[in-house]
Amino acid sequence: MKIVLDAGHGKNTPGKRCPDDSMREWDFNHTVAQYAAHELADYEGVQTKFTHDTTPSRDVPLKERTNTANAWGADCFVSIHANALTGQWGNAKGIETFTFTTKSKDSVALANAVHSKLIAKTGLFNRGVKSANYHVLRESHMTAILVECGFMDNRDEAALLKSDSYRRKCAAAIVAGLVANYGLKTKKKKPVTPTPPPTPDKPEVSKMEKWKIDMANTAITSLAKKGVLSDPEGWKKKVANGEAEKDLAWLIFYLADSASNLPKK
């Protein structure tokens, strides 16, 4: 499934902004497109392509946009916009979605699916699904719709259009409409095999500790040969397990001493 996400207009396109220039339409359009593409990456077999310039450098001509979509063999084309009525602050409000004037069955179905999700998620006034002779709808060779997500020259809606939370809502609504219309399935996540907790490493024996153990073992061997110490192997295990800590000094002290005067241990 190849889905084109087309963010309408460029950063510096004349007129495409709030009356006080507090937001350019490109800022809203391209951000929503980015969020939508990110969400669509979670669905099986879905590829997305932008036909707009993802930098503010230029407004890609409409013919170039539709040529790109057609050459790619896209299955659907979604053009994302923010609306304006007069370019002066006013009361125009709401969301509307467009298909081409021929109102093809597939485009109307997609428009209805996306539009209903936009209204449900944003709660804005429903201006309906309409048709228009827009270039991107007319010249694209696939199912195509154009969404207008609120008015830049309405102060209340302009504040929404500037907010990240509203942009995410619009992106999520567009994706939800695409999912509903095309029956898209989320990618199956590979089961994660739990990693067993690491076996705690035995603490490293310091050079001093190793010296003490070696000396103790030497003492055990020597004293056992002299008959002063019984069960030398048992003693060595105790030393290795840290169970003979109190006896280490005794063993080392008597290593070089005469065994004849020592009490048996």
Image: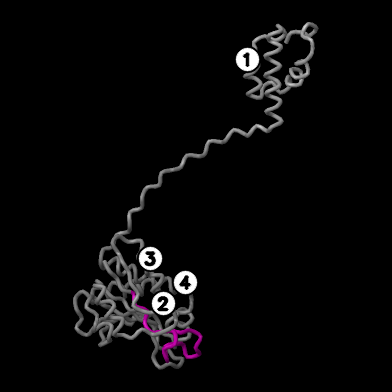
Quick one: label 4 or label 1, which is nearer the N terminus? 4
Quick one: label 3 or label 1, which is nearer the N terminus? 3
Residue flagged by tag 4: what amino acid is it?
Ser
Q: Disc number at residue 133?
A: none
The range drawn in magenta is 5-24
Percent position of residue 161, x then y: 45, 79
Residue 236 sits in quarter? top right
**Which quarter of the figure is the C terminus placed in?**
top right
Which sits in the foreground, 75 or 173?
A: 75
Residue at left 28%, top 82%? 98
Question: Which residue bears the numbered disc 1?
Answer: 234
Question: Which residue bears the numbered disc 3?
Answer: 39
Helix, strand or loop status at disc 2:
loop
Helix, strand or loop for the magenta stretch, by majority: loop
Question: Which residue bears the numbered disc 4?
Answer: 165
Question: Which residue bears the numbered disc 2?
Answer: 54
